Amino acid sequence: MSDATSSPQAAQEEVMAVRAAKRHLDEASIDVILRKARSHYAWTDKPVTDAVLRELYDITIAGPTSMNTCPARFVFVRDAENKERLAKALKAKNIDKMMAAPVTAIIAHDPEFWTQLPFLFPHEDRRPHFEGKPEHCEITALRNSTLQGAYFMIAARALGLDVGAMSGFSNEIVDKEFFSQNGWKSNFLCNIGYADEKALFQKLPRFAFDEVCSIS
């Protein structure tokens, strides 16, 4: 991945080389990351290593965000004590799912993301777009951290992991337990690990193109 010091020509050549090497994912790869992928709620005891979590982040962070704001923050909850802290926030039906997962990621965002723009977007100073505008900051952070959460799930599947996103919890309790010092705000939770497929039921339906799409 090119860094901020790379020349435009080098960046362009890199993208062209990537496209030349693989124009289209094969059908099996598309099935793994989205088309035949499933949300999982039961897990084997196979651990998710630190190395895998780091690789997962490295892939996730490559996804685009507006002005490269990268507002998402990730907390990987794995040890028993912190799982118990997280359990305080969950609806009862979600506690066992979370406790059984090797890792539960808290996908959060930093409302002060814009203070890092001199590093993330060095071409010009975009901080005035956000300074003193908390509502605009929140909308931007929530939208883009949600995007990053989706990249996270696809990246996990690409690495052979399984995922199960959850929204049945109290954001207020999670933020109090985990983010009282830094002011981050939780968005959603995502269990990650290696699933026990025997717990799956039939795949739920999706809309057809003509039901929800138009071309104008």
Image: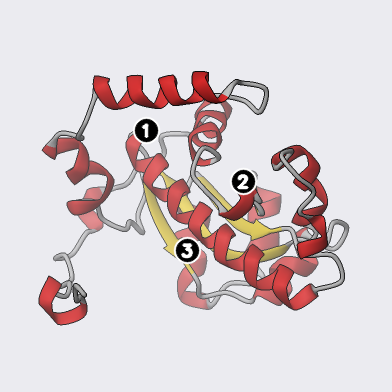
What's the residue at 40%, 57% (across, down)? 164
Q: Secondary structure at mark 2?
A: strand
**Can I make out residue 208 in this image?**
no
| Residue for badge 2 | 76
Q: Earlier in the sequence, mark 1 or mark 2?
A: 2
Residue holding disc 1: 159
Mark 1, secondary structure of its residue: loop
Work out whether residue 72 or residue 157 is closer to the camera in this orientation and state it: 72
Comparing 79 with 142, the one in front is: 142
Per the rendering, the mark at residue 96 is: 3
Q: Nearer the viewer, residue 157 or 81?
A: 157
Residue 100 shows in the view: yes
* Mark 2 neighbour class, 10 Å CA radius: few under 14, some 14 to 19, many 20 or more: some
Question: How far across and down, in percent of the image, does residue 118 sit?
Answer: 80, 42
SS under mark 3: helix
Q: Is residue 109 above or below residue 55?
A: below
Residue 104 against residue 208 in the figure, above or below = above
- Sequence-earlier tag: 2 or 3: 2
**Residue 192 x, y percent position in the rendering:** 45, 47
Q: Amino acid at mark 1?
A: Leu
Viewer-side label of 1, 2: 1
